[in-house]
Image (cartoon, rainbow, N blue to C red):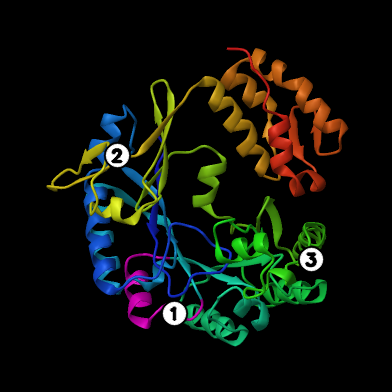
């Protein structure tokens, strides 16, 4: 509970929006971006006041910082400098902190890279999605395979070695052969970390609406079937493992010693605090934990529209939307420990679960666990339970089947 906190910074700006995406992000001008940075910094200054109001512990020490989006690399070096100034004014950032930037290939200027390196940034996650140009273009990505390779070389020349490559299985026009090519390219570029996500199409995205209406503009008819995507995901697991990039979470693979320390906080229920649009947080309390999330409406976040439940920013004469708050009680904490832990390949230590929540809770969950084991989706050895490879393909189904009443 007293360990360092992870910090997530949401930067919701994009140069172009992917056709399958309906995240709280968009294309905006420089003036709006600067206003956002100022609001973000005010929120950082208000963090301790917010935590006190929720009776939550906000550690001073920070050992991971993650800039996600959107495309955070669109901010200028000066804007990043401003954000880091406020972060270091409110927190003690560890000398060996893992500092990660999400980045679209070709959208990181030399000046911004130099400033981020000066601030201690030591990890980049490139949203490659596909090394096949037709597939990238079909979903609105602006880069090519050659640009990706050039970006890897450029950041490595700057001294940065920790690179993650994001891939998506199930993109329009993707085939078994083209997917294998993308995975092999990720291996060939020697990225120490690879993330593989199954395509999730939001119904309100451009591609999602087209799939519902059976249109043709965004290649909805060229989206592979769910069964095909599942098979290709399984192939990627084998290929990456054979290359020494081992799976440690449903969507994440790493060479030894290169796991994402920040993302592990989510799955291990460590404390993290999020700043920015639609940013989520989880902090511990005397009674357990509290989760809270910022609004996903940019105008509300910036204070440009009236809000029903306002929160006054510390040191700022501005009222903004108060965060949505969920109190995590004992039962909810048990479920989270089980479901988040099962996302990890190593699974859940039932002995540790019993010591945290008592034997009665684990006993009540056992019939559902055994039922899912019988279905071949979980395996249980001694005091550890983990998803099988098949279980990882249908993890949401597994988790829904484990939602059973537990002892209070």
CA distance for labels 2 and 3: 46 Å
The C terminus, quarter of image: top right
Which quarter of the figure has residue 150?
Answer: bottom right
Q: Which quadrant of the view contains residue 34? A: bottom left
Q: Residues within 10 Å of mark 1 (few under 14, many from 20)?
A: few
**x then y, percent, for residue 247:** 70, 54
Question: Does any portion of residue 255 appear in the rendered image?
Answer: no
**Is 166 above or below relative to 154?**
above
Spatial distance from mark 1 to mark 2, Cα to Cα? Answer: 41 Å
Provide the residue designation for mark 1: 158
Q: Nearer the viewer, mark 2 or mark 3?
A: 2
**What span is colored magenta in the figure?**
105-121
> Which residue sits at x=82%, y=27%?
371
**Side (left or right) of 333 relative to 362:** left
Residue ID for mark 2:
322
- Identify the disc placed on residue 239: 3
Q: Position of residue 271 (x, y in %)?
A: 43, 39
Could you tell whether 172 is left or right of 324 in the image? right
Label 3: element kind: helix
State the residue at coordinates (57%, 81%).
148
- Kindly state the secondary structure of the residue where label 1 is placed: loop
């Amino acid at each position: 509970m007293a360990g360092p906190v992870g910090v997530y910074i949401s930067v919701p700006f994009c140069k172009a929006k992917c056709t399958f995406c309906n995240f709280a992000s968009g294309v905006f001008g420089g003036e709006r971006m600067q206003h956002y940075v100022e609001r973000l910094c005010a929120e950082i200054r208000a963090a301790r006041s917010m935590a006190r109001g929720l009776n939550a512990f906000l550690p001073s020490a920070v050992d991971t910082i993650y800039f996600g989006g959107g495309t955070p690399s669109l901010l200028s070096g000066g804007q990043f400098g401003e954000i880091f100034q406020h972060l270091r004014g409110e927190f003690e950032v560890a000398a060996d902190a893992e500092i990660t930037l999400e980045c679209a290939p070709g959208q990181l200027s030399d000046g911004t890279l130099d400033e981020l390196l000066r601030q201690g940034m030591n990890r980049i996650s490139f949203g490659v999605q596909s090394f096949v140009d037709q597939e990238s273009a079909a979903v609105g990505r602006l880069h090519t395979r050659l640009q990706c390779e050039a970006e890897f070389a450029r950041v490595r020349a700057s001294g940065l070695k920790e690179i993650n490559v994001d891939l998506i299985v199930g993109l329009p026009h993707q085939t078994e052969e083209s997917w294998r090519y993308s995975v092999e390219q990720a291996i060939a570029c020697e990225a120490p970390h690879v993330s593989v996500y199954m395509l999730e199409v939001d119904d309100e995205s451009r591609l999602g609406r087209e799939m519902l209406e059976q249109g043709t503009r965004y290649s909805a008819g060229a989206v592979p079937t769910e069964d095909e995507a599942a098979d290709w995901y399984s192939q990627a697991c084998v290929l990456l493992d054979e290359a020494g990039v081992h799976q440690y979470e449903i969507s994440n693979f790493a060479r030894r010693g290169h796991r994402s320390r920040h993302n592990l906080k989510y799955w291990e229920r460590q404390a993290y605090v999020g700043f920015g649009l639609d940013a989520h947080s989880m902090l511990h309390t005397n009674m357990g934990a509290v989760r809270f999330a910022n609004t996903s409406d940019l105008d509300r976040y910036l204070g440009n529209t009236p809000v029903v439940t306002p929160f006054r920013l510390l040191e700022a004469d501005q009222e903004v939307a108060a965060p949505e708050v969920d109190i995590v009680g004992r039962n909810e904490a048990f479920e989270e420990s089980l479901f988040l832990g099962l996302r990890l390949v190593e699974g859940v230590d039932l002995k540790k679960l019993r010591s945290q929540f008592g034997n009665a809770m684990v006993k009540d969950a056992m019939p559902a666990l055994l039922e899912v084991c019988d279905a071949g989706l979980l395996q249980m050895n001694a005091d550890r339970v983990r998803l099988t490879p098949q279980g990882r393909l249908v993890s949401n189904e597994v988790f829904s089947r484990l939602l059973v009443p537990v002892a209070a």
